[in-house]
Amino acid sequence: MNKVIMKALLINTFQKEIRNKTLVFLFVLSIFLILLINQISVFFVSNPAMNEGFQWSNTKMSFLYEIISAWGSMLGFILGVSTIKSDMDYGVSQQIVAFPVKPPLYLACRLVGTWLIVNFYYIVTLLLALLVFALSGDQLAFSYKIFLSFGVFSLKILICITLAALLSIHFTKVIAFVSSIIIFMVMNVSNAHFAKGFAWNELGIFSTLGLIVHWILPRIDTISGLSKNLLMDKNTFTFSFLEGGHLVLSYAFLFWVTYFSLKSKDYQGGE
């Protein structure tokens, strides 16, 4: 029974979110930027004096990662603020949980369905970029690590969607969207800063808040670092079991805060 319900909710999520015009806009923009990066690279490679000391294949892949990372995160926020909010505003969430559907299952299916849509955008964009780069004559090292990179980055997308969904329960879509980006930036800065260690006697008010964010919320900067190094076939970044455990527990915390927030609102929208 749960499998049938999950399938129905996932399909419904695809139907609801796939019509978002932002997805098409960002995809077209990504194609334009991929072609632009490729042409710039061709120009520099064709001028040996300007190409000295650089590995343009790695540079292009680095640019590619930054573009897809930015667009993927942005799309996660855009779709994340609507995946639950739209249900609440139209009374759909109340109707769904009135059926034999467990509320956590409903929330999980909405988040996962949105996550799969953004992942589809990510992998299509990545494969298209690799094809364009290959046709331009680049000898790119295509390995299984590219798919590992995709899998790691997809965790970051899921965090973006969940964070946006949480904030959309309490605020309007615009406020939730802007707040998601600000909190996301704070998470990035905190992770990058406290990953190097800290001294208790140097902690002030803002640094203490940053440390709390570093320990309570998922470490997206760590995820980004691992994903990028895998994409570029670097082995300069390690991911410990401690980091993996923290990721699981911190995301579980974020999910349950989202669930209890939704439950406290009685699955009903309102400004």
Image: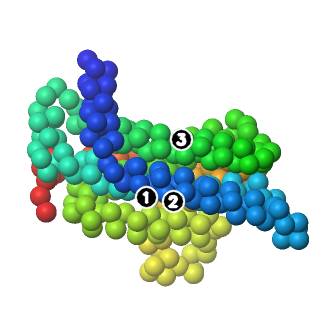
Relative height, residue 146 to residue 184 (above, below): above
The residue identified by callout 2 is 70
- The residue positioned 25% from the left and 61% from the top of the image is 173
Residue marked by disc 3: 124
Q: How far apart are marks 3 and 1 (CA)?
A: 16 Å
In this image, 52 relative to 253: left or right? right
Of label 3 and label 1, which has the lower sequence position? 1
Q: Tell me the kind of residue under disc 1.
A: Met
Residue depicted at 78% across the width and 48% down the height: 138
Camera-side residue: 260 or 10?
10
Question: In front: mark 3 or mark 1?
Answer: 3
Give the CA distance from mark 1 to mark 2: 6 Å
Which x, y percent locates residue 36?
62, 60
What's under tag 2, amino acid-wise? Ala
Q: Name the residue under label 1.
A: 74
Q: Are marks 1 and 2 in contact (CB under 8 Å)?
A: yes
Q: Residue at x 40, y 65 (%)?
A: 181
Q: Is residue 184 above or below residue 262?
A: below
Which quadrant of the rendered structure holds the N terminus? top left
As measured in the structure, the alpha-carbon distance from the residue carrying label 2 to the one carrying label 3 is: 15 Å
Q: Where is residue 221 in the image (x, y as percent from the top left)?
A: 56, 60
SS label for mark 1: helix
Frontmost of labels 2 and 3 is: 3
Q: Where is residue 228 in the image (x, y as percent from the top left)?
A: 65, 53
Residue type at mark 3: give it: Val
Circle 2 sits in a helix, a strand or a loop, which is it?
helix
